[in-house]
Image (spheres, coloured by chain):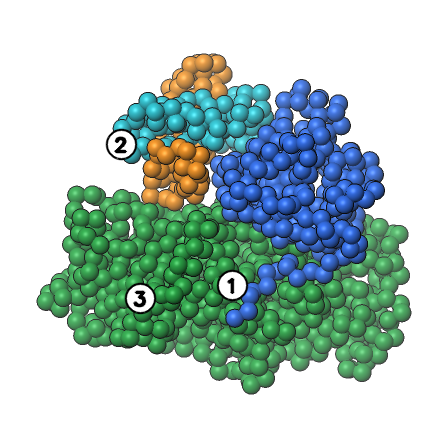
Chain colours: A green, B blue, C cyan, D orange
């Protein structure tokens, strides 16, 4: 590298830093606190260089260091039994956890947030959210096989909601569809608490053979470090423009992009190219570039390895030649990967790059010094212990306390409230209520969204929306596959964060079991407000405690996830929204259970008992009430229900199954009827007598641990015997009636399927075109 | 280290051993998505799928070619615009136009590439509703004499998935009239026109009937449990698309319809 | 560095779905002065060095072969812009 | 009828995947004279009647609000073309 070819900057070398201890540095502008900056100085034994400051500031940010949540997140690793560890091949801490599926197969999945970028520029924000999570999956050595997108927007009728909704959905589709990854599920919630802070979470799942698992570490002195994929631009360093002052030659720095634009084509090529590298065993370690870009990739690879790393930064291929060293280190340009390659494999590696026309540049090599050394044109600008950057960031025990208002909120129950006045009870008003429920913003059909997603690509999708879980085949010979569901209920979690988080897990677990799959692993995305607000911090602490306790009780380990904090508008936080994803396994996806019934005359059973639980429900929400206690959590019941649903699927005892959650039995009956356009006759008197509830409550209560199943006549005895043997409440509530074209519920006016469909499917098109 | 078995590679070959000798090339461009699916469809129909790479300069000894769906080069300029200039495309164009009349099927992005290559007339523009749309689509097979439709009856209705953003077929009126007159409208949308295509056209052929292009995806309707019936359950069967592949295989091995 | 601008528009007889959507949206935003809108593409090709006749000819050919599809689009403009 | 042309380009600092794909394809077709390509949009708004200052102002405002996304795009040109 000659000096003529590299740009001249006022380079702050390590040598210079040692000589000029009193130089003012813009650490505050870069988001560091005084104590954190002091810690950097202490760690280094001198002031940091500009480049080092850039690295520490991004790596010690909340987003990268989990400094507010780390102390709590530990519980996910602690509350784990040996039994739960059995199938965990890679646990928390890597890019994504890996779970054993048997037969030499492994699966990796993870959920992440891209909330604030999706508010600023919904299309690109959501698109790059998909891009980022997919790279996490590739970097484990896996082929990505599906994506999901839990979404939360502001009020459906707010003028800004359409902008975010249109953009985010088009962005997820535009990026995901172009990658050839089927979208197999997600969520859609409208609530004004998300108006200025929508939640756009993205999940990706990938599969691999055990021996193909790759980890992000740089080992083996002399191995080469390579950066490949897109060129590095000024993306994601907008706030850090203070670093541009490093520049002193005549080329003025260009503007830094306010948002990042995704290039799904580049990512698709990157996926195929990485799979070819894995297939040829051409990389020793690999790491995607996401938040904190090269800072993160180099320091994590180096600190996870057994040596050190030396990197020449002028070798990075740039999209914008005015970038300074610090900016290059911080850039979050998309569609890039970093890998470690042995010298023998260089040629083969380059051949793969040429084949796919992917740009790459060799940046340096693995050393045995234990230091991460970054040079600029040969001069040392970073000389750090990589662990101090990647792993030893600050950790805070932020103060938290149960909010003063919590008791008042919990005391304000729906039953008897002004919003509860005139509760429907006549056949006509109940029919109107059911119709209103299934047309409501949160309960209406999501087809407007999901029709914009490719659910077929790959040819392995065995189930997708609107069923309870997405199911993808992994092994074409045996039919081995996985099922996935994501859930969260911000209202429940607001009413009681500990139990609300457990309810999110319970619902996702139930959805997976309903499909017939055995729940195996959990990934979570914790979307909360500011951790500096003790109320919010309490919500976060409680949610993590609740979730980790429940994972332990259900025997499903958390294998990875993401924390997204500061989700608030001004000082008003969103509802605490822990989005929980559960992954399950099906030995043969042919056995999956869809959510709708088809066969005339089949018996319909309601599993589980119903209590009067309307607080936080969709019904209460539709009436503008939020208070009281969320439905009771009963994990033993969830587990028992899950076992029944799984056995029933495996042994062919049920043809359909749909869990009860938001909207209760009313929503489930309508959805199961509309799934294939087949009606049913339902009588709930026995259930009402047994459980001591009225018809309205039987239909609209959101008691957990329930499901409805369609049982072939020939299987009824076997199925009910199984439930009886397990002591699980079950009631025959009706039969499938293929000819009627209606959902007939005793005590409720007949609901024609055509009218229900119009109500259910008309809502999103009405608002969004 | 063992090889990563790519999903879709390990499928048992179906019945009819006599078809296995027929070799169907499946082209991959950068950005192609449905190549594994097309190869699976060929195998499920009983044939042998041969991967072809866009940069190859020979077609090898394939008996037919499928240009699958996806977003070649991101579809950034226009769908299919850049892919059409790939070295392999000129071989495919020559072979399709030669006396041997190599059977070529373009699905979705493949159809767009075929129009950009002028193997088929007209072009695709953005869907009239401007959104990506994925749905199960009923098609009527208007012409059962092309290389890819021999196993269907004329007038037969089939259900296959449709998924695209730029699927609106357009051509000059006189071109459309010519296509109709020559029986080259091979598939028409039934019940619902998902993208505003002129005259409900879903797929067309060249004059000789060896080159066929369509927007919907027959390769996603070839396997019980993974097609329209299982995923959407609104009519048809899961395997309505298999006929495309058995048609060409039967034609190649010289079997009767 | 000099650039060559290439403008491509959908043929007049071809329906332009994007233009149609825009013309529908304009009055809702209070822009009432326009009776139709068409959306095309603008390409800016950067030339390293001088724009020779040969390079301009290349741009014209690229415009006709790659940058536009003559079945649906017209190249309406190819011009040099000095930066 | 007179038209107003609005040209919108991706901001220079923003990645332009479309331009990138084109610049990759050009040399393969023998067009070697271009070092970079950016793809933007060209809108033609037809005006019924005369182009008054008010209408031109409308076009400018529509360009900034509806026709471009100011987060990632710049309006590089608004001009009247008599047809
Ligand atoms: N944003 C989305 N993307 C993809 N699928 C979605 C999205 N929102 C909802 N779905 C799907 O729609 C169906 C119904 O959603 P929902 O009622 O939330 O399911 P459940 O109550 O079983 O969790 C599910 O299959 C779900 O995966
Ligand atoms: Mg469910």
Q: Which residue is mark 2?
A: C49
- Residue hosting label 3: A365
Quadrant holding the C terminus of chain A: top right
Residue at screen point 33% across, 22% down: C53
Q: Nearer the viewer, mark 2 or mark 1?
A: 1
Above or below, A266 against D80 in this view is below
| Same-subunit check for callouts 2 and 1 | no
Residue A215: image location, x then y, percent: 44, 70
Q: Cα distance, mark 1 to mark 3?
A: 23 Å
Query: Element at badge 2?
Result: loop
Image location (x, y in percent) of residue B3: 55, 66
Question: A289 or D35, which is in the foreground?
Answer: D35
Any atom of ligand 1 within 8 Å of the CB at mark 1? no
Q: Where does the image place residue A767, in percent across and percent down from the top left?
A: 60, 43
Question: Measured along the vertical axis of the image, is residue A521 above or below residue B87?
Answer: below
Direction from residue A344 to residue C11 in the image, left or right: right
- Which of the 4 quarters of the picture holds residue A107? bottom right
For the residues tagged 3 and 2, is the chain the same? no
* Structural distance between the alpha carbons of marks 3 and 2: 37 Å
In the displayed structure, does residue A105 sit left or right of residue A328?
Answer: right
Where's residue A534, x and y in %? Answer: 40, 71
In this picture, is A612 found above or below A270?
Answer: below
Q: In terms of sequence position, does the residue under pointer 1 or pointer 3 come before the other?
A: 1
Q: CA distance from mark 2 to mark 1?
A: 44 Å
């Amino acid at each position: 590298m000659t000096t003529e070819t590299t740009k001249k900057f006022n380079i702050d070398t390590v040598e210079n830093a040692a000589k000029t201890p009193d130089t003012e540095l813009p650490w505050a502008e870069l988001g560091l606190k005084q104590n954190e900056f002091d810690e950097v100085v202490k760690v280094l034994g001198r002031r940091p260089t500009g480049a080092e400051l850039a690295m520490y500031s991004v790596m010690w940010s909340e987003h990268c260091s989990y400094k507010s949540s780390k102390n709590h997140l530990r519980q996910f690793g602690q509350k784990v039994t040996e039994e739960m560890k059995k199938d965990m091949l890679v646990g928390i801490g890597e890019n994504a956890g890996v779970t054993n599926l048997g037969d030499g197969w492994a699966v990796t999945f993870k959920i992440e947030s891209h909330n604030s970028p999706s508010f600023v520029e919904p299309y690109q924000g959501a698109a790059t959210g998909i891009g980022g999570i997919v790279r996490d999956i590739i970097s484990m050595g896996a082929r990505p096989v599906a994506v999901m997108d839990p979404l939360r927007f502001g009020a459906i009728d707010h003028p800004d909601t359409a902008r975010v909704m249109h953009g985010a959905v088009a962005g997820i589709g535009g990026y995901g569809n172009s990658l050839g990854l089927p979208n197999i599920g997600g969520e859609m919630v409208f609530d004004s608490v998300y108006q200025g802070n929508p939640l756009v979470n993205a999940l990706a799942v990938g599969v691999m053979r055990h021996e193909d698992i790759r980890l992000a570490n740089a080992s083996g002195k002399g191995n080469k470090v390579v950066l490949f994929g897109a060129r590095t631009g000024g993306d994601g360093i907008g706030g850090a423009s203070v670093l541009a002052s490093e520049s002193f030659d005549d080329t003025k720095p260009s503007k830094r992009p306010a948002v990042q634009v995704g290039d799904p084509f580049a990512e698709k090529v990157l996926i195929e190219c990485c799979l070819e590298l894995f297939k040829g065993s051409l990389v020793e370690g690999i790491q995607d570039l996401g938040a904190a870009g090269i800072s993160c990739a180099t320091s994590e690879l180096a600190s996870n390895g057994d040596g050190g790393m030396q990197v020449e930064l002028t070798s990075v291929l740039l999209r914008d030649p005015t970038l300074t060293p610090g900016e290059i280190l911080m850039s979050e340009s998309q569609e890039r990967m970093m890998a470690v390659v042995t010298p023998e494999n260089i040629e083969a590696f380059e051949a793969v790059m040429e084949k796919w026309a992917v740009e790459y540049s060799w940046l340096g090599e693995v050393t045995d010094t234990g230091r991460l050394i970054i040079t600029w044109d040969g001069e040392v600008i970073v000389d750090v212990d990589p662990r101090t950057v990647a792993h030893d960031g600050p950790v805070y025990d932020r103060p938290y306390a149960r909010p003063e208002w919590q008791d008042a909120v919990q005391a304000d129950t729906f039953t008897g409230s002004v919003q509860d006045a005139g509760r429907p009870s006549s056949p006509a008003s109940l029919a109107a209520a059911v119709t209103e429920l299934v047309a409501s913003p949160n309960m209406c059909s999501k087809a407007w969204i999901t029709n914009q997603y490719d659910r077929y690509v790959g040819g392995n999708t065995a189930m997708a929306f609107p069923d309870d879980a997405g199911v993808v085949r992994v092994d074409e010979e045996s039919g081995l596959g996985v099922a996935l569901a994501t859930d969260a209920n911000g209202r429940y979690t607001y009413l009681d964060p500990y139990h609300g988080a457990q309810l999110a897990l319970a619902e996702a677990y139930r959805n997976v079991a309903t499909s017939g799959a055995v729940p195996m692993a959990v990934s979570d995305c914790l979307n909360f407000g500011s951790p500096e607000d003790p109320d919010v911090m309490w919500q976060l602490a409680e949610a993590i405690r609740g979730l980790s306790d429940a994972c332990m009780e259900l025997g499903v380990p958390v294998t990875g996830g993401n924390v997204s904090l500061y989700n608030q508008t001004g000082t008003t936080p969103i509802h605490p929204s822990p989005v929980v994803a559960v992954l399950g396994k099906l030995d043969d996806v042919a056995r999956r259970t869809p959510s709708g019934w088809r066969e005339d005359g089949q018996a319909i059973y309601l599993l589980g008992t119903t209590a009067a639980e309307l607080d936080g429900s969709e019904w209460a929400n539709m009436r503008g009430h939020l208070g009281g206690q969320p439905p009771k959590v009963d994990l033993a019941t969830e587990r028992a229900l899950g076992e029944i649903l799984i056995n029933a699927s495996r042994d062919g005892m049920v043809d359909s199954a749909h869990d009860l959650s938001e909207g209760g039995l009313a929503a489930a009956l309508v959805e199961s009827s509309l799934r294939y356009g087949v009606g049913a006759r339902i009588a709930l008197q026995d259930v009402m007598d047994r459980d001591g509830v009225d018809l309205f409550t039987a239909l609209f209560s959101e008691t957990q641990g329930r499901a409805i199943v369609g049982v072939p006549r020939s299987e009824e005895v076997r199925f009910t015997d199984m439930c009886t043997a397990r002591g699980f409440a079950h009631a025959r509530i009706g039969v499938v009636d293929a000819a009627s074209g209606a959902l007939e519920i005793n005590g409720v006016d007949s609901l024609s399927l055509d009218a229900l469909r119009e109500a259910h499917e008309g809502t999103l098109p009405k608002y969004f075109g | 280290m063992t090889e990563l078995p790519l999903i879709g590679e390990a499928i048992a070959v179906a019945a009819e051993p006599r078809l296995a000798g027929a070799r169907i090339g499946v082209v991959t461009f950068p950005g192609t998505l449905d190549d594994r699916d097309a190869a699976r469809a060929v195998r499920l129909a009983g044939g042998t799928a041969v991967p072809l790479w866009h940069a190859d300069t020979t077609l090898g000894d394939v008996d037919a070619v499928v240009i699958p769906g996806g977003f070649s080069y991101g579809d950034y300029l226009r769908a299919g615009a850049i892919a059409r200039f790939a070295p392999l495309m000129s071989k495919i164009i020559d072979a399709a136009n030669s006396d041997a009349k190599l059977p070529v099927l373009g699905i979705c992005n493949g159809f767009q590439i075929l129009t950009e290559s002028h193997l088929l007339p007209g072009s695709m523009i953005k869907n009239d509703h401007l959104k990506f749309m994925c749905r199960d689509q009923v098609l009527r097979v208007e012409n059962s004499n092309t290389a890819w439709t021999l196993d269907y009856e004329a007038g037969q209705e089939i259900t296959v998935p449709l998924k695209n953003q730029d699927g609106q077929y357009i051509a000059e009126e006189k071109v459309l009239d010519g296509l109709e007159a020559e029986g080259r409208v091979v598939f028409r949308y039934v019940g619902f026109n998902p993208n505003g295509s002129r005259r409900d056209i879903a797929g067309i052929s060249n004059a000789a009937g060896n080159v066929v292009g369509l927007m919907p995806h027959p390769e996603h309707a070839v396997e019980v449990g993974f097609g329209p019936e299982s995923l959407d359950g609104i009519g048809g069967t899961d395997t309505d698309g298999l006929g495309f592949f058995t048609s060409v295989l039967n034609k190649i091995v010289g079997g009767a319809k | 560095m000099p650039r060559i601008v290439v403008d491509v528009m959908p043929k007049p007889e071809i329906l332009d779905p994007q233009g149609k959507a825009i013309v529908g949206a304009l009055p809702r935003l209070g822009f009432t002065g326009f009776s139709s809108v068409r959306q095309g593409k603008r390409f800016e090709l950067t030339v390293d060095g001088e724009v020779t006749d040969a390079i301009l000819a290349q741009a014209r050919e690229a415009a006709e072969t790659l940058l536009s599809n003559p079945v649906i689009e017209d190249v309406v403009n190819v011009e040099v812009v000095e930066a």
